[in-house]
Image: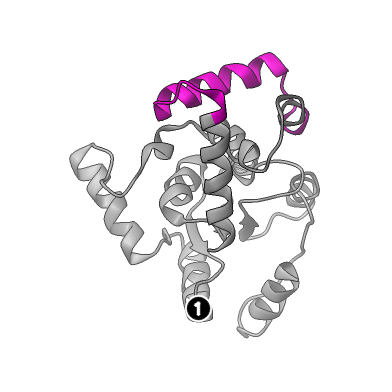
């Protein structure tokens, strides 16, 4: 439904054409290779892998491809990660249609598209060289650690996380240990509780 909504939205602009849509990262990579669009709009949450990892891969395959990341998740956690990965913009799914169109046009023109609030946060980070005040401890996690944290929040066990990310269970355990260290938690059950509560909070956004 979301993809169909974007198709109708783009076609109704009058001066932009909708090229194609894909249901997962694998299909997207294949279609980008067959028919590279001017701008690729992609969701951070994909069924087969992380949208951040897809952005990184496509940046290597198509360095000139402009990408606009969309998500239901808090931009304070994801926007800078998406830009670091190689996206040219980040917009919340809940943003008004006018903001979505402005973001798409800005990225298509070669610019960077984030909300005014996020733009200020990024400028502060670059000007001071420090982490902005609004960023919490989760911002200190690497992209892979953040993926593991999200899956813990979904109630996945170590084996399920390993299978989903295509890594070994030992690697998952190392990531969990690093996450607990960065979040100041010594008890594994404390991490699970915190991650699940965080995931529940994201559903209300």
Per the image, the residue denoted by label 1 is 96
Residue at horizontal 41 percent and vertical 52 percent from the top: 76
Compare residues 140 and 64 and report the one nearer the observer: 140
Q: Position of residue 146 (x, y in %)?
A: 54, 36
Residue at horizontal 43 percent and vertical 62 percent from the top: 113
Main secondary structure type of the part rendered in magenta: helix
Q: Position of residue 188 (x, y in %)?
A: 55, 24
Which residue occupies the extreme left position in the image?
128
Residue at horizontal 74 percent and vertical 66 percent from the top: 19
Q: Is residue 63 left or right of residue 32?
A: left
Asked if residue 98 is positioned above or below residue 151 in the image, the reply reads: below
Work out whether residue 115 can be spotted.
yes
**How busy is the neighbourhood of tag 1: few (under 14 within 10 Å), some, or many (20 plus)?**
few
Q: Is residue 74 left or right of residue 37?
A: left
* Range of residues picked out in magenta: 163-189
Q: Quadrant of the N terminus?
A: bottom right
Residue at horizontal 62 percent and vertical 18 percent from the top: 173
Asked if residue 114 is positioned above or below residue 48 in the image, the reply reads: below
Tell me, what colour scheme is on the image? Answer: one colour
């Amino acid at each position: 439904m979301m993809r169909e909504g974007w198709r109708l939205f783009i076609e109704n602009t009058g001066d932009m054409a909708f090229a194609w849509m894909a249901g997962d990262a694998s299909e997207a990579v294949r279609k980008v290779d067959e028919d590279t669009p001017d701008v690729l709009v992609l969701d951070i949450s994909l069924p087969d892998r992380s949208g951040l990892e897809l952005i990184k891969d496509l940046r290597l395959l198509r360095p000139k491809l402009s990408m606009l990341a969309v998500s239901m998740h808090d931009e304070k956690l994801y926007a800078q990660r998406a830009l670091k990965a190689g996206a040219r913009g980040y917009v919340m799914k809940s943003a008004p249609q006018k903001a979505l169109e402005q973001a798409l046009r800005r990225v298509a023109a070669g610019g960077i598209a984030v909300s005014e609030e996020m733009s200020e946060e990024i400028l502060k980070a670059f000007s001071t060289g420090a982490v902005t005040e609004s960023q919490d401890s989760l911002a200190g996690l690497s992209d892979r650690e953040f993926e593991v944290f999200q899956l813990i929040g979904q109630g996945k066990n170590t084996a399920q996380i390993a299978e989903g990310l295509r890594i070994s269970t030992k690697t998952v355990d190392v990531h969990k240990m690093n996450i607990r260290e960065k979040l100041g938690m010594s008890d594994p059950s404390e991490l699970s509780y915190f991650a699940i509560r965080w995931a529940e909070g994201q559903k209300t956004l």
